[in-house]
Amino acid sequence: MDKQWNPDLQVSDIVILCPYSPLWYAPWVAQPSVAHISENATQSSQRLVQNIGLVVRGKEEVIKMAVVSLLARGHLLLEDVPGVGKTTLARALAASVGVSFRRLQCTSDLMPTDVIGGNVFNQLQSTFEFRPGPIFTQVLLADEINRTTPKTQSALLEAMDERQVSIDGETHKLEEPFFVVATQNPQEFYGTYPLPESQLDRFLVRLSIGYPPPGVEREVLTRRGADPVQQLDAVMSASELRHVQQAVDSVRVDDAILDYLHRIVIATRNTPLLSIGVSTRGALGFERAVRARALVEGRSFVLPDDVKALAGPVLAHRVKVSGGVGGGAIRDDAQRVIRELLTVVAVPL
């Protein structure tokens, strides 16, 4: 917009800082305002993080990333060893939002109809009637997703990407919001079916929870009584969640920040360290995710730090390391390559 001088401007009103600093201010420039994204949306997202933190202790950054994935209308892949809270995180998130939740235990004999449902013949009425599967929920936990066959894994593709399921030529819409949380153990390969690139690309964020800090784990050992997730109160309704998801679209991304994000994506395609770079779908998801993180952090505009923080969780599972064949070591190599690219791509000043 054109600069218009304010005659009442005082010298003390002008602060010269990096334009991406939260303290930057110039009276003639339209500043990002909570009026654009709703202060309630910012407070609701932070309240959601705090509520989940009552159960998943000592993992605030992991919780924020999970909430970012939800607010950006993506899906979440949790990779870690058993027993560190992957299922608990998914349950706590669903309980905090107050939406329907279903758990799907993936096994080698699980069939696509066990996931999406199918048409069953009703002998009394001599007609076929549709019986919905567990995917007809708002938060779906696909536990140990790499233990089921590729045929069953592919049953999730349409639902994750288009929020609908097609059965016998008929399309069934899924209720919004729709969020898939899948878990897998990256250290165990016997009897597993690694997710193909087309399936991995549907997940917006991939996280590893890790072991809790010793002090937090010691406190957990003293817990007694009922399941803590069942004691959680919902701090957000489904309609409020949809409002916050819409507010993410109003978060401001400066052109310089967008160019920075795009240069990182291009760098994954040009480096000899990677044989497969980030897709256009991945770039779109990356942009939505940085907007959501800014909202969770209480801002109406994106900073370079948002891009840096999400580069690994959003991009690493979408690339393939040159000469790699898969496994936990390759996953770590992909994270390392993304970190190296961040050191060579110029940050906007």
Image (cartoon, rainbow, N blue to C red):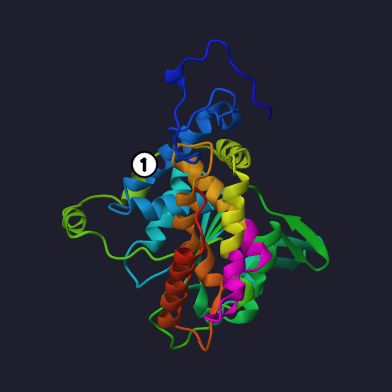
Q: Along the line of sight, which residue is nearer the eye, 75 or 219?
A: 75
Q: Is residue 189 visible?
A: yes
Q: Is residue 197 magenta?
A: no
Q: Along the line of sight, which residue is nearer the eye, 57 or 206?
A: 206
**Residue, x 29% and y 52% (percent of image)?**
57
* 348, above or below 105, in the image: above
**Residue receiving disc 1:** 50
* 53, above or below 184, in the image: above
Q: State the image quarter where residue 30 is shown.
A: top right
Q: Along the line of sight, which residue is nearer the eye, 292 or 144?
A: 292
Residue found at the very far top of the displayed protein: 8
Q: State the image quarter where residue 27 is shown.
A: top right
Residue 118 position within the rendered picture, expressed as x and y whole percent measured from the top left: 71, 67
* 11, above or below 78, in the image: above
Residue 111 position within the rendered picture, expressed as x and y whole percent measured from the top left: 62, 77
Q: Amino acid at mark 1?
A: Gln
**Residue, x 44% and y 56% (percent of image)?**
309
Relative horizontal placement of residue 5, taking residue 25 as reference (left or right): right
**Image quadrant occupied by the N terminus:** top right
Residue 213 position within the rendered picture, expressed as x and y whole percent measured from the top left: 22, 59
Q: Is residue 137 visible?
A: no
Q: State the image quarter where residue 248 is shown.
A: top right
**Residue, x 44% and y 43% (percent of image)?**
96
Magenta highlight range: 265-284
Relative horizontal placement of residue 72, taking residue 229 as reference (left or right): right
Q: Along the line of sight, which residue is nearer the eye, 326 or 89?
A: 326
Check disc 1 and report its element: helix, strand or loop.
helix
Q: Is residue 283 magenta?
A: yes
